[in-house]
Image: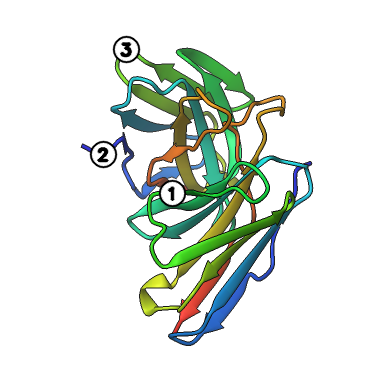
Amino acid sequence: QKEVEQDPGPLSVPEGAIVSLNCTYSNSAFQYFMWYRQYSRKGPELLMYTYSSGNKEDGRFTAQVDKSSKYISLFIRDSQPSDSATYLCAMTNVDSGYSTLTFGKGTMLLVSP
Amino acid sequence: DVKVTQSSRYLVKRTGEKVFLECVQDMDHENMFWYRQDPGLGLRLIYFSYDVKMKEKGDIPEGYSVSREKKERFSLILESASTNQTSMYLCASSSPHGDRGQETQYFGPGTRLLVL
């Protein structure tokens, strides 16, 4: 079993739809969970960051972490064509002077006008 | 804003050539990373560095080396380029002292390398 599983998509939705993107993971030591957005031919950029379980909201985006199920989600409300990108989940545990991230392979999202 | 720059956006090299990819960050970050990204395989960590002159192997270090002589600069070296090293190379940096902690990595725009 891979450490982080993420459906590659593509996920196609009409403008205005609610989008749900998900990752599952196997390492119970992960404490920090992130979502990165990557536009075509660009580097990933941090979108959302959460620590431990719970929800975090930022505008149209909500990140949800369920550590008991080892499951994280990113919800996008009122999706826009500009949200079309690849979304990468990432996670880590921090117990030393540095940490590395474990990434999912990314889900491609296409929002049509 | 954190800025991570990479020396080239696109690069074409011949098999057997020595290739240098340069990365510079302007936020005084301690940690720097090199990844490659391939379709279906996602982001894979090649090497990282948590201090000047320090380096650690990532998941796929074979065929690569790195150099970090200055805090702001992290170089990836392909000693003898091969066609299976054709990929998108991404540099990132992070700091344990930032307001979001060291787990937040900031990425450069990437270098698309084609080895013929």
Looking at the image, which residue is at 56% across and 53% down?
A39
Secondary structure at badge 2 equals loop
Label disc, if present, on residue A10 of the rendered structure: none
Spatial CA span between label 1 and label 3: 29 Å
Looking at the image, which residue is at 43% across and 85% down?
B15
Q: Residue under circle 2?
A: A2
Q: Mark 2 is on which residue type?
A: Lys
Q: Residue under circle 3?
A: A68
Q: How crowded is mark 1: few (under 14 residues within 10 Å), some or many (20 or more)?
A: some
Looking at the image, which residue is at 79% across and 41% down?
B1
Label whose residue precedes the other's in the sequence (2 or 3): 2
Q: In this view, does A87 lie to the left or right of A3?
A: right
Q: Residue under circle 1?
A: B58
Q: Which of B113 and A99 is in front in this view?
A: A99
Spatial CA span between label 2 and label 1: 16 Å
Residue A73 percent coordinates (x, y) = 42, 26
Q: Tag 1, which chain?
A: B
> In the rendered structure, are the residues bearing label 2 and label 3 in contact, judged by CB atoms less than 8 Å apart?
no
Q: Residues within 10 Å of mark 2 (few under 14, many from 20)?
A: few
Looking at the image, which residue is at 46% across and 20% down?
A31
Q: In this view, does A69 lie to the left or right of A54?
A: left
Closest to the camera, between mark 1 and mark 3, is 1
Q: Which of B79 and A36 is in front in this view?
A: B79
Q: In which quarter of the image is residue B83?
A: bottom left
Closest to the camera, between mark 2 and mark 1, is 1
* Same-chain check, marks 2 and 3: yes
Position of the C terminus of chain B by quadrant: bottom left
